[in-house]
Image (tube, helix red, strand yellow):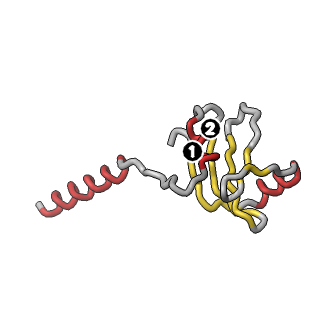
């Protein structure tokens, strides 16, 4: 009987853990990035915080394979950055993900 109670308890815990919705802390995300979070999910947009070239950058990008889109780069205060094509290529080769901020639909 103890085994049955134990199994029910484990099942309940696992079920509860799987259905609990994760909430992201967006308190430190600049407003310039939050505006992207209100857009639709076309082309699978996302926002991440990255470390690259001794800087911390927010990046808004899309992963939809059929979409021809341009990534947006922001400094740690939310100010827009204009990276050259060469810098953008280096960024995507050398970046280190610090934290995924937002993925549309999740």
Q: What residue lies at 43% left-to-right and 51% top-to-bottom?
A: 22
Residue 83 image offset from top left, x and y in percent: 83, 51
Residue 87 image offset from top left, x and y in percent: 85, 55
Q: What residue lies at 64% left-to-right and 46% top-to-bottom?
A: 32
Q: Quadrant of residue 52?
A: bottom right
Residue 60 image offset from top left, x and y in percent: 67, 46
Give left or right: position of 10 versus 104.
Answer: left
Q: Nearer the viewer, residue 55 or 10?
A: 55
Tell me the crowding category of disc 2: few under 14, some 14 to 19, or many 20 or more residues within 10 angstroms, Cα based.
some
Residue 1 image offset from top left, x and y in percent: 11, 60
Q: On screen, 40 above or below 61? A: above
Q: Quadrant of residue 62?
A: top right
Q: What residue lies at 63% left-to-right and 52% top-to-bottom?
A: 48
Disc 2 secondary structure class: loop
Disc 1 secondary structure class: strand
Q: What residue lies at 17% left-to-right and 62% top-to-bottom?
A: 3
Q: Nearer the viewer, residue 10 or 53?
A: 53
Residue ID for mark 1: 103
* Circle on res. 44: 2
Q: Nearer the viewer, residue 15 or 20?
A: 20
| Earlier residue among tags 1 and 2 | 2
């Amino acid at each position: 009987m103890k085994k049955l109670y134990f199994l029910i308890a484990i099942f309940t815990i696992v079920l509860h853990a799987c259905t609990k919705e994760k909430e992201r802390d967006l308190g430190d995300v600049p407003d310039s990035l939050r505006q992207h979070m209100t857009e639709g999910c076309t082309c699978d947009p996302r926002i991440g915080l990255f470390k690259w070239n001794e800087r911390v950058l927010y990046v808004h990008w899309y992963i939809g394979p059929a979409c021809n889109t341009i990534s947006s780069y922001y400094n740690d205060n939310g100010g827009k950055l204009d990276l050259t094509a060469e810098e953008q290529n280096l960024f995507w080769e050398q970046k280190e993900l610090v934290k995924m901020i937002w993925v549309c639909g999740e």
